[in-house]
Image: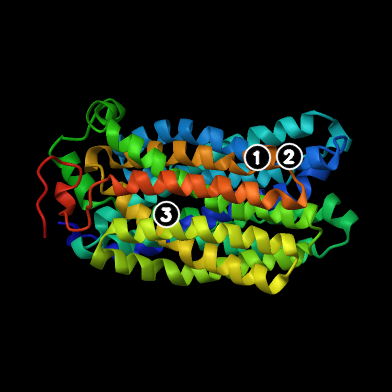
């Protein structure tokens, strides 16, 4: 049944759409680390301003569980395509408006209030993006290639981060006064082009054969959330716990950048290049790890990636504390670009395969977005606990190691699903292929 779909088109559309969507989401994180403390919280001490700016980054993750409940219901009740179009329109609009905001010096406390509101809209939007794209691609994919095809969603996410960081490279090189007055706004305004291009692509998608069969046989759940929490709550809990591995990404993207530039006084342009090259490595690594997962299983690849992140985060943050750029690039690319990519490659298929078609989007959206909400505050929590001193790298690394241990436990105790037929996923009777 799934082979009658259009897996390549779905995968490409997922890649492009996710790249565009997460471009919008990630430029906020870069701006929060480099600019927002000075633009929206100038009356605070530098360390406090940085902490408050990072908190606005985390606020976007608060809206993600709420959006997951709403968009998850829409996706399982009315179709995957409707969610994918809605998320792009909402994200593009809210991101453009961030670039139009007045500063604290212009309107006072209203400026950070408006910033938080728009960040909440971003979080609401992105909550349905990956779950919708993953569900669409998984249900179109051939039986033996589900991890490979669904990995295009996360591959697109990394590409979006590359574009976002690359957009900030020339902006970060501007003189301080130009950067803080108008330069930081340009990447946000560019989102108009991003949203229009993504909307054209998403509108051409077709619904998945599995969802269309449910519509034809009148088996679509009228209340998907009720079915989800009555019959699959354990899997939602497992996905939530496992999804906290996203803390590795938020620490790398936001906290490490802030620590390097604001604490260790390293060159912000050079540190942005670390992110670009690490994400280039991730774009290459993700489909390779996914292909391996289709051959040996989800769990070995996922667990190996989590353990590797726990170890290499110590090396990456330590290298920043030494100020040695060669070490920073080596550890950053190895940790985020290669090892963390193993988890990114596997989870789109692994999480989706825990649920049947009728609640797949809801289960993935709610489980991942609650886990991601926790991960979104990892930079704020890590900074609050470990501080901003040069030696704070050790405490932050220990926090990440603990998170990785929790992730390994959640994944290791789950069922292996790579040889289960797509029609049988999430059901008591599993038919292997």
Q: Which mark is residue 51?
A: 2
Q: Which mark is residue 202?
A: 3
Report which quarter residue 290 is drawn in: bottom left
N-terminal-most mark, 2 or 1? 2
As measured in the structure, the alpha-carbon distance from the residue carrying label 2 to the one carrying label 1 is: 6 Å
As measured in the structure, the alpha-carbon distance from the residue carrying label 1 to the one carrying label 3 is: 34 Å
Point out the frontmost of discs 1 and 3.
1
N-terminal-most mark, 1 or 3? 3
Residue drawn at x 35%, y 35% is 237
Label 3: few (<14), some or many (≥20) within 10 Å?
many
Looking at the image, residue 81 sits to the left or right of residue 272; the answer is: left
N-terminal-most mark, 3 or 2? 2
Vertically, is 200 above or below 240?
below
Label 2: which secondary element:
helix
Point out the frontmost of discs 3 and 2.
2
Residue sitting farthest toward the bottom: 326
Residue drawn at x 53%, y 57% is 20
Q: Is residue 186 visible?
A: yes
Looking at the image, residue 328 sits to the left or right of residue 41; the answer is: left
Report which quarter residue 293 is drawn in: bottom left
Label 1: few (<14), some or many (≥20) within 10 Å?
many
Label 3: which secondary element:
helix
Q: Position of residue 239 (x, y in %)?
A: 36, 41
CB-based contact (under 8 Å), mark 2 and mark 1: yes
Quarter of the figure that contains the C terminus: bottom left
Residue that label 1 marks? 380
Residue drawn at x 16%, y 54% is 420
């Amino acid at each position: 049944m799934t082979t009658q779909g259009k897996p390549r088109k779905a995968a490409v559309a997922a890649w492009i759409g996710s790249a565009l969507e997460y471009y919008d989401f990630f430029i906020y994180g870069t701006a929060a680390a480099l600019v927002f403390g000075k633009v929206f919280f100038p009356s605070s001490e530098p360390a406090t301003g940085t902490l408050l700016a990072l908190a606005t980054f985390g606020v976007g993750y608060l809206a993600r569980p709420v959006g997951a409940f709403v968009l998850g219901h829409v996706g399982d009740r009315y179709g995957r395509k409707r969610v994918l179009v809605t998320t792009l329109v909402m994200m593009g609009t809210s991101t453009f408006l961030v670039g139009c905001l007045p500063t604290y010096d212009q309107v006072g406390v209203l400026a950070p209030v408006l910033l938080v509101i728009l960040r909440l809209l971003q979080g609401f939007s992105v909550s349905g993006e990956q779950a919708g794209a993953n569900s669409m691609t998984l249900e179109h994919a051939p039986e033996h290639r589900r991890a490979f095809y669904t990995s295009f969603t996360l591959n697109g996410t990394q590409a979006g981060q590359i574009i976002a960081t690359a957009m900030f490279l020339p902006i970060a090189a501007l003189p301080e006064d130009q950067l803080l007055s108008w330069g930081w706004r340009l990447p946000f305004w560019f989102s108009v082009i991003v949203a229009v291009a993504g909307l054209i692509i998403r509108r051409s998608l077709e619904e998945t054969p599995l969802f269309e069969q449910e519509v034809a046989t009148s088996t679509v759940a009228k209340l998907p959330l009720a079915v989800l929490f009555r019959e699959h709550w354990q899997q939602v809990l497992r996905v939530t716990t496992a999804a906290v591995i996203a803390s590795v990404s938020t620490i790398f993207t936001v906290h490490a950048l802030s620590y390097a530039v604001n604490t260790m006084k390293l060159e912000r342009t050079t540190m942005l290049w670390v992110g670009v090259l690490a994400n280039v490595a991730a774009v290459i690594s993700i489909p390779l790890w996914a292909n391996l997962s289709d051959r040996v299983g989800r769990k070995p690849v996922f667990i190996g990636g989590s353990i590797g992140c726990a170890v290499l985060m110590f090396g990456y943050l330590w290298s920043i504390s030494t100020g040695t750029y060669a070490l920073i690039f080596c550890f950053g690319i190895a940790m985020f670009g290669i090892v963390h990519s193993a988890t990114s490659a596997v989870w789109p298929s692994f999480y989706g395969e825990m649920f049947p078609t009728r609640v797949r989007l809801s289960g993935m959206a709610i489980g991942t977005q609650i886990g991601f909400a926790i991960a979104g505050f990892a930079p704020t929590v890590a900074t609050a606990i470990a501080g901003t001193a040069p030696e704070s790298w050790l405490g932050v690394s220990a926090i990440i190691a603990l998170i990785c241990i929790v992730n390994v436990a959640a994944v290791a105790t789950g069922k292996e699903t790579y040889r289960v037929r797509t029609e049988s996923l999430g059901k008591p009777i599993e038919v292997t292929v």
